[in-house]
Structures are given as C-alpha cells and as structure tokens.
Amino acid sequence: MNVVLQLMHRLFIAATILLSALFLASCSVSKNPLRKTIKLLQKGELKDDTSYVYSLPFEKGKKYRLVQGYFGPFSHKERAALDFAMKRGTKVCAARNGVVVRVKEDGDRGGMNRKYRPYGNNIVIEHADGTRAGYWHLQFNGALVNVGDTVQQGQVIGLSGKTGYAAMPHLHLLVWRYDNNRWEQIATRFRTQKGIVYLKGWKKYKRPDNE
C-alpha cells in the first residue's frame, strides 16, 4: 500500500509540473514589479542581508519539493507564494515566531475547481513586526493550534492536506505585510541545508538538522 501511495504522489507531482509547463507557454507573465525583484534576489544580483530569515515550514531533516514558486505559471501568476508538495497528514511547522490570528479547519473537500476555494483550511500567524504568514490547504481538523496561541519557530502547527482549490496535496505558504494602507505580499529568505536563499520552483529543499 505504501508503494502505491508513493507512486500516486509522484504522479501528482509529475502532473503538476506538466500543467505548469503548459500554462507557462500559454499565460502572460505578471507585470508586478515584485516579480522582477524576486528574480534578482534569487540570482544573487540583488543582495539582501537584513530581512528576517524564515525556517522551512516542515520538520528538521525533512526535504520537500517546491512544485510552484513565487509568481508561478499555474496558480501563482499574481502571487508571491510557495507550494510544497506534501502527502496528506504531513506535519506543518511555523516558519517564524508569532501569534495565531486565524484558524479554519472545517473544510472537507478540495479539487481543481474554483468552487472549492471556500473549503481551504488554513492557519494565519502574525509576527512581531506586523507581517503575517498563511498556511493553506490543511486537512480536515488539521489545525493543532488555536486563535490567540503563541507559537515558536519550528513548532508543529498543523497537518497538510488538499482542501480548497488544490490539484494535489500540498502546503501553500504566503507572507504579507500592511503597507501604504493595504496588504502587500512579500518574498522571504529561508534557511536551508545549503544556506540562506530565496527559494526557486521545482527544486527540493531540506531543513537543516541542527537548526
């Protein structure tokens, strides 16, 4: 049974990569200036050594593939968000210290239809500097924290799933801040086994064992 589940998971990833490639060829590129900035940061042409360094949102020593990165062609065309491929029930960890400000865990369905958007389970955590991080597509009753809880970086906060608008089981992570009287998405640096980087789509990232 485990072999079958692993095969299905790999097929899901392959299907997502194929769909993304098709969308890349047919969809227009976002004109959001943040997209260009992120590209420069990823290439190292623009240096950043002052922003907060986030932890990868899973357990130490674990490695997961980023199936869609910032402004990805599939469903992130206008979103500075990250999608990590994860089996249902995978432990999701807080990427940064903060206070839980929203929890939804009663969604019980999901799929590739926008009608499922309202069912997407999620946890939102506010950080000391006012930024917030949202963790989406958690499984039904998959939240392990409550509104008002203080959480620590690396703490297990929920279980991944496929609720809401989702093609496959995965964790959708988005960070944003309130600026100029509106909420703005932001890209963040992460500490990985190979150093501190801005993550890129299709690559696998491991959270350091000694973090």
Image (cartoon, helix red, strand yellow):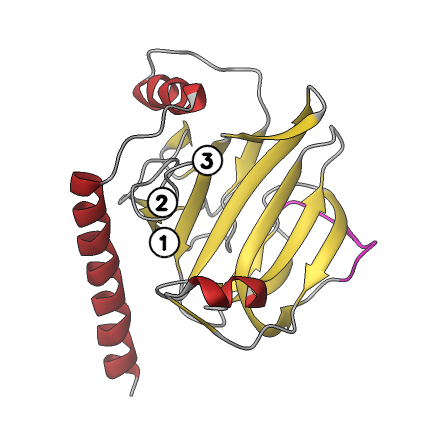
Whole-angstrom CA distance, mark 3 to mark 1, is 19 Å
The label number, if any, that marks residue 205 in the structure image:
2
At x 37% / y 53%, what residue is drawn?
A: 63
Q: Quadrant of the C terminus?
A: top right
The answer to whether residue 165 is above or below residue 70 is below
Quadrant in which residue 73 is drawn: top left
Is 211 in front, or is 108? 108
SS at mark 2? strand
Q: Position of residue 65 (x, y in %)?
A: 32, 51
SS at mark 1? strand
Looking at the picture, which amino acid does disc 3 mark?
Answer: Ala
Quadrant in which residue 19 is drawn: bottom left
The residue that label 1 is drawn on is: 64
Residue at the extreme right of the image, as rendered: 148
The label number, if any, that marks residue 80 in the structure image:
3
User: Is the Cβ of the residue at disc 2 closer than 8 Å to that at disc 1?
Assistant: yes
Q: Is residue 94 left or right of residue 82?
A: right
Can see residue 80?
yes
* Label 1 environment density (alpha carbons within 10 Å; few <14, some 14–19, many ≥20): some
Q: Closer to the N terminus: mark 2 or mark 1?
A: 1
Looking at the picture, which amino acid does disc 1 mark?
Answer: Tyr
